[in-house]
Amino acid sequence: MTTTIRNITLVGGSGRLGSTILSALQKSPQFDVTVVTRFTSTAIFPPSTKVIKVKDDYPVGEMVAVFRGQDAVVLSIGFGPWSERSHSSLVEASIQAGVKRLIASTFDAGVNDEAQKIFPVAETKARIVEELKRNEASGWSWTAIQCGLCFEFCIRYNFFQINAANRTARVMGDGNTKFSCTSLKTIGTAVGSVLKNLDQTVNRRVYISNFETSANEILKAYGKAVGVDEWNVTNFDADEAIDDAKKQLLLSSENLVAMGTLGLAIVVKPGLGGDFKAEGLLDNDLLEIPTLKVDQVVTSILKAESKVTKCSEITGTQG
Ligand SMILES: NC(=O)c1ccc[n+]([C@@H]2O[C@H](COP(=O)([O-])OP(=O)(O)OC[C@H]3O[C@@H](n4cnc5c(N)ncnc54)[C@H](OP(=O)(O)O)[C@@H]3O)[C@@H](O)[C@H]2O)c1
């Protein structure tokens, strides 16, 4: 494959990941980027962004017309009961339109069978990848980016249950299992890198991370950032937390706390493949992914969230 990618359509460019992907792609003079947004969306894009509005469920016929003439389609659509069907429509439309490379809306951690049994999102993403494989055809190809935990989300949504005001933390398991983490900015970089390395990334998952860390290391880094030396830590059992979260999800499939618990469980439970480095999977060199230090990243996220002052000034339950 000796194609150069120029015209890219990004679907979901207003989202949490999508907006950083858009920003990274727009910075590269090689790419001419168009964003697809839904008619009902209230999204606002940076000035001079080319925007196309489409029906909410991305009908195949309409999307074929939108994707025609595009070299690549990047999907970064949110996750919900609707997303798998929307993803399928977008994949089908990209094939019919003659797009050369589709980057799927995966951006996830666990691909291991056991992880899929625990975390419904991982199971759905695995099905998405199986569908991509089934559709491999001459001229059309795909890449799925595995980024581990998106680190900003973990800190912002307090995955690690840190309460700096009370100097307490609840840690799943013993807190020592390492897992891969990537920053939002790096995910944007990785999308551009994949599109500049088509041959090396064809029809496969690529694995990236800025660092591998553990819950205990994150707690230490958090303490350093907010001036807490000693934490009062309560460890809780991962399997019990999984059972409990699954019960909660039976009551409401959209319980985000329960979903978050399962998403965390698949990386902190040993043996589920959450540490891409240990598994020898990383494509960091190929995709020019920077190595970062957990301390620096925690500090910069907390600064951006205005949480780095003195610990005594921090209030609320989110630490
Ligand atoms: N590894 C991790 O830790 C991690 C963390 C978060 C997300 N992710 C993954 O990253 C991908 C993007 O997630 P995200 O959190 O960035 O998504 P998001 O912000 O929730 O949504 C992204 C975009 O999806 C579009 N969309 C299409 N149909 C929609 C619908 N019915 N309801 C709401 N939005 C809809 C919207 O674009 P318009 O409004 O412009 O139409 C929205 O801005 C997903 O695959 C997700 O699973 C991974």
Image: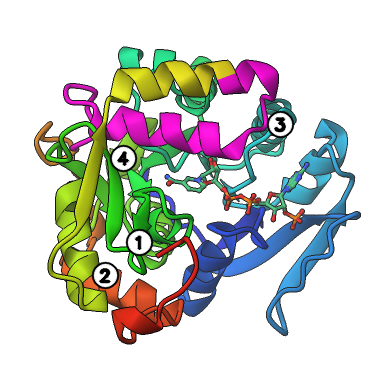
Answer with the quarter of the image where residue 290 lies.
bottom left
The answer to which of 161 and 96 lies nearer the viewer is 161
Residue 201: x percent and y percent? 33, 41
Say which label, 3 or 4, has the lower sequence index.
3
Q: Main secondary structure of the magenta part?
A: helix
Say which label, 1 or 4, has the lower sequence index.
1
Report the residue marked by disc 2: 297
The amino acid marked with disc number 4 is Val
Report the residue marked by disc 1: 183
Answer with the quarter of the image where residue 304 lies.
bottom left
Q: Provide the secondary structure element on which disc 4 rests.
A: strand
Question: Is the CB of mark 1 within 8 Å of ligand 1?
Answer: no
Q: CA distance from mark 4 to mark 2?
A: 23 Å
The amino acid marked with disc number 1 is Ser
Q: Is residue 204 magenta?
A: no
Q: CA distance from mark 1 to mark 4?
A: 16 Å
Q: CA distance from mark 3 to mark 1?
A: 33 Å
Residues at discs 2 and 1 in contact (Cβ within 8 Å): yes
Q: Is residue 80 left or right of residue 108?
A: right
Answer with the quarter of the image where residue 188 lies.
bottom left
Say if 67 sits above or below 166 in the image: above
Q: Residue at x 17, y 36 (%)?
A: 281
Magenta-colored span: 248-275
Report the residue marked by disc 3: 96
Residues at discs 1 and 4 in contact (Cβ within 8 Å): no
Residue 180: x percent and y percent? 23, 45
Q: Is residue 268 magenta?
A: yes
Q: Is residue 16 left or right of residue 200?
A: right
